[in-house]
Amino acid sequence: GQQVMQIPQYQHVQEGEDFTTYCNSSTTLSNIQWYKQRPGGHPVFLIQLVKSGEVKKQKRLTFQFGEAKKNSSLHITATQTTDVGTYFCAAGTSGTYKYIFGTGTRLKVLA
Amino acid sequence: DTGVSQDPRHKITKRGQNVTFRCDPISEHNRLYWYRQTLGQGPEFLTYFQNEAQLEKSRLLSDRFSAERPKGSFSTLEIQRTEQGDSAMYLCASEGGKTQYFGPGTRLLVL
């Protein structure tokens, strides 16, 4: 079955450093979504990417969808303590509204 | 506040008992999803509804799990003959504009 892996599993950074998480699917995707889950909270939608090679920015966050639509990345510039949490990608495929969530990257930001 | 509510928020039960969880989605959303999340893992897809129709169910889901959305509004998830391995957070999400809005979850502990 479809697998969605994220690396790294954990990342500790000093406040102000950059952070990147990568999401890789075993199959071609129709779209990919990114979510953030704070400790003790529920996933919160960040963005959806649909087009091959698409790049979207939200303030310090940059999201990219690979040309082959099998991978994606989330890059945070100059991390802040408010960026702490686990970042999940969620993969969508054609013919279904089901999403497969990745394994997540847990970010800790040291002040 | 995402507008999706779940009840109860916490449930402790003994092995072998049946439990039922309720999800009230955002009122205008047609699609409703159930996920299960264990510590350190991403949300695992269980099933989803389009209005009252259950369109897809995870093959990993045993026959002890059943979900309904009788009038296309609220949904219930029932687990029969609970096992200790069922202990997890059960998340509900409703979808509007291709964005999933998650509820706070029901944390189940099976003793």
Image (spheres, rainbow, N blue to C red):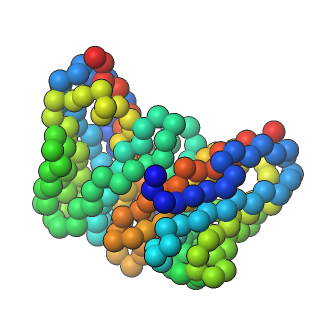
> Could you tell me residue B55's position as x and y percent?
54, 79
- Confirm whether residue B77 shows in the render: yes
Position above or below: A61 against B102? above
Q: Quadrant of the C terminus of chain B?
A: top right
Residue A14 occupies which quadrant of the picture?
top left
> Could you tell me residue A3's position as x and y percent?
41, 55
Residue B109 occupies which quadrant of the picture?
top right
The answer to which of A51 and B9 lies nearer the viewer is B9
Query: Residue at coordinates 18% horizontally, 49% vertically from top-left?
Result: A58
Is residue B97 shown left or right of residue A77?
A: right
Query: Residue at coordinates 17% horizontally, 24% vertically from top-left?
Result: A16
What residue occupies the far top of the structure in this picture?
A: A111
The answer to which of B14 and A92 lies nearer the viewer is B14
Residue A51 occupies which quadrant of the picture?
bottom left
Query: Residue at coordinates 49% horizontally, 67% vertically from top-left?
Result: B26
> Could you tell me residue B57's position as x and y percent?
58, 70
> Could you tell me residue A60's position as x and y percent?
16, 40
Query: Residue at coordinates 56% horizontally, 38% vertically from top-left?
Result: B39
- Confirm whether residue B84 shows in the render: no
Is residue B45 shown left or right of residue A95?
A: right
Is residue A96 shown left or right of residue B69?
A: left
Position above or below: B4 against B97? above
Q: How many marks?
A: 0
Position above or below: B23 against A97? above
